[in-house]
Image (cartoon, grey):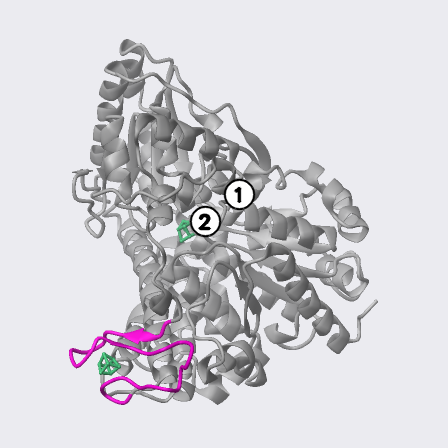
Amino acid sequence: KALKPKKEIELKDLTICDATQQMLAKARRDGVETQFDRAAGMKACPIGADSACCKHCFMGPCRLNAKDPYGKVGVCGANIDAIQARNFGRMVATGTACHNDHGMAMLDIFRDVVQGKIKDYRIKDVNKLVSISKEIGIETEDRSVQDIAMDLYHELEKTYTQVEGELPFAKRVPPKTLEMWRKHGIVPRGAMREIMEMMSRTHIGMDQDHTNLIKQICRTALADGWGGSMVATEISDILFGTPSPVSVEVNMGVLKEDHVNVIVHGHEPNLFESMLASVNAPSLLESANEAGAKGINLVGMCCSGAEVMSRHGIPHAGNFSSTEPILVTGAVDAMAVDVQCIQQGLVKVAECYETELITTNPRCHLEGATHIELDEHNPQKCTDEIVIRAISRFKNRKFPVEIPKKVGIGVHGFSHEYINYMLGGSFRASYTPLNENIINGRIRGVAGVVGCTNPRVKQDYVHVELVRELIKNDVLVVQTGCSQIALAKAGLTSPEAAALAGPGLAEVCETVGMPPVLGLGSCVDNTRILIACSEMVRTGGLGDSIADLPVAGAAPEYMSEKAIAIGQYFVASGVYTVFGVTFPVTKGTNFEKLLFEGLEEMGMGKWGFNPDPHEMARMMIAHIDKKRQALGIDK
Ligand code: SF4
Ligand code: MSK
């Protein structure tokens, strides 16, 4: 049964995205429900929001009182700190599992490509293959690409399966940061081991000391950032190409009324890569023409879209909260999805407009959607079939089409390699230009602004306001995921946006010809930010560890457990990380204090929370200034 809000919320209070607003208005006229309606019709559970409940055993479920957190314990005697830490640990474990599952799927494909079992993909970036292999100690001199690649596969497999030792990309961590992790015993072994231990330690009757649990929480999260996510990024670059700056159109206006429109939404890039081949197949183009279409228009959404817009300049139609509204255009002939951030609500909306909604991955089916499984050994069988269905839907379109005429154009595809190249040459004697510009104060610091959209807050508003405020204060912003799409729609990813930056940052942007907001790709590409941080430490002048850098991170509108895992790996790596929307802890508890203060005392970064973008910016800038002062580079 549909959840009806008591009072209809004004559309301008739901989103600042004009296209999404237009489609929400149409959805109301058409009687179609989206996540915005469901959020308005269901208040978030206040006990769950404070993480003051536990359902880890059947003596419970137990709920404590967040207003008097130490007044009560669970049936087993667990106090508020144990309960919250266990809940937090499980969120981190789930998010880490998702990213590792994605990374491992990429590594499986890589292995089969190297062994010649998959023929549709090939190693595109041999230079990257060689440089990563060297970095993690694989011999590359006088060896064939295939031999190096097989060794790289075996080495990176340890990211998941290793039971003892340190995961392969620990070699990329600045020595002082690694030393701090070793001191606390939090260097990840392999992700499977860390996730297993996290789940085990949060079972009834296991670890009930939040100060001990936090160590496994950090270790698990680090197995995401420096583990599965990093492997996903690097292997995808090797297979499908390392991004470099490319101009891309973003927003719902990229749909074309007279074309067959196919959207790919999800996370793993291989579905999209095969779909690209299918939409360019002469026989399918001919069928589309015969059906009366001028062509086949392939566009992306969410992180699948962010990956291919960075690599190939494919247009991007919108972020997470727009995935239902875009179907309301009536112009989408097929939406193909793989894994992660695929809401079940899509099924109903697709049904309303007879859009083909097709799941393709064995790990992510949706009841009511068509499932056409993608076999990596013959991927085009699946993607061709999706295009055929899309053509047939185009031919039989029954609904009037309304496409919002909104398109933002920006530059995306800033890999860490490109940032190094762009800002990392060695024209100065001492430091690289990025570090030099930070030291001389033109760039005050660097902020990573990333993450989802969430119907509990006005879509895109917090992202855009926060980033505007940061660049105005000379903070260079790097972005990934749905946040990057929010800023692209708002026009801040174009070089002209330098006019909105403070004088120092504007000067750097104008000199280099870059925007003040650099889009790095999908959620797993947050690891590009980790590597950029390591590079900043390595090239000198900004301290010895990531925690010394004048940097900060934010996920202003996050909604997923993956975001919590990402936040935690940034914090454990040394970055102050501020979240908006809500934060899953009870205020005034020891566990909250540990996350928001204690971790910094242990040599890491720390968490921050504020739903207001201006406050959030103030907190991040104050932290950047604190680090500048400690480095002695305060203006
Ligand atoms: Fe309650 Fe303890 Fe069981 Fe949790 S583990 S449900 S707090 S009895
Ligand atoms: S897609 S995890 S809504 S960023 Fe990666 Fe967007 Fe968040 Fe999904």
- Disc 2 element: loop
Report whether 143 appears left or right of 618.
left
Magenta stretch prevailing secondary structure: loop
Sequence-wise first label, 2 or 1: 2
Residue 244 higher or lower than 19, as above or below = below
Residue extending farthest right: 635
Q: Is residue 628 left or right of residue 600?
A: right
Which disc is residue 282 wearing?
none
Q: Which residue is mark 1?
A: 486
Q: Are marks 2 and 1 in contact (CB under 8 Å)?
A: yes
Residue in view at x 70 percent, y 68 percent: 622
Rendered position, 318 above or below 146: above
| Disc 2 CB within 8 Å of nearest ligand 2 atom | yes
In-front residue for pair 83/94: 83
**Residue 113 drawn in magenta:** no
Residue at mark 2: 453
Q: Position of residue 214 (x, y in %)?
A: 42, 81
Relative to 473, say whether 270 is above or below: above
Residue 600 in view in this figure: yes
Mark 1 Cα-neighbour bin, 10 Å: few <14, some 14–19, many ≥20? many
In the rendered image, the residue lying farthest to the front is: 6
Quarter of image, res 248: top right
Viewer-nearest residue: 418 or 405: 405
- Structural distance between the alpha carbons of marks 2 and 1: 9 Å
State the SS at label 1: helix
Residue 244 visible at all: no
Residue bounds of the magenta highlight: 51-77
Q: Residues within 10 Å of mark 2 (few under 14, many from 20)?
A: many
Quadrant in which the N terminus appears: top left
Q: Residue at x 65, y 66 (%)?
A: 619
Q: Tag 1: residue type?
A: Ala
Residue 74 belongs to magenta span: yes
